[in-house]
Image: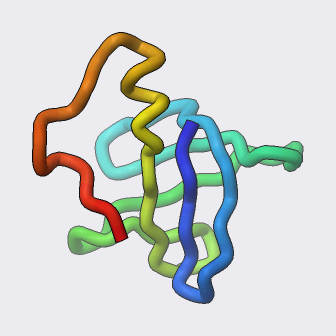
Amino acid sequence: MMIIRRLNGETHAAVMLALTGDQLRVALKDRDDVAEFRLVNGAWISEDCEPVTFEFPLGVFEAIGMMPQAGFITRQ
């Protein structure tokens, strides 16, 4: 589970399907199509050419029995 955040504040719940090099494919909640994002000059860009950020709730790490190192996750 992950949260995709757009510059306009819009958020989408999603599940990561594949991460290959500079391309990320996700299944968005309540949508039939797969979304793709590309890493360009250190920023993730949507299919609409808009920068996005990804958030991974701590519950995801806990569910797989793994906790990130201190400082790995930042809160806004």
Q: Which residue is drawn at 68% across and 59% down?
A: 12
Q: Where is residue 22 in the image (x, y as percent from the top left)?
A: 33, 51
Colour setup of the view: rainbow
Height in image: 27 above or below 75? Answer: above
Horizontal relation, residue 33 to residue 6: left or right: right
Residue at x 39% of width, y 66% of height:
44
Among all residues in the image, which is located at the extreme left?
70
Q: Residue at x 56, y 60 (%)?
A: 4
- Split into 4 quadrants, where in the image is the C terminus? bottom left
Dividing the picture into quadrants, the one containing residue 14 is top right
Q: In this view, does 76 lie above or below 65?
A: below
Quadrant where the N terminus is found in the figure: top right
- Give the left or right position of residue 73, taking residue 54 as reference: left
Q: Which residue lies furthest to the top in this view?
A: 65
Can you give x and y, in whole percent of width and height, for residue 69 in the image?
12, 35
Residue 30 lies left or right of residue 12; in this view the side is right
Q: Which one is nearer the viewer's eye here, 22 or 60?
A: 60
Q: Position of residue 47 (x, y in %)?
A: 61, 68
Instruction: Give the left or right position of residue 72, taking residue 67 as reference.
Output: left
Q: Classify residue 2 by image quadrant.
A: top right
> Which residue occupies 50% across, 58% down?
37
Image spot of residue 62 (x, y percent): 40, 21
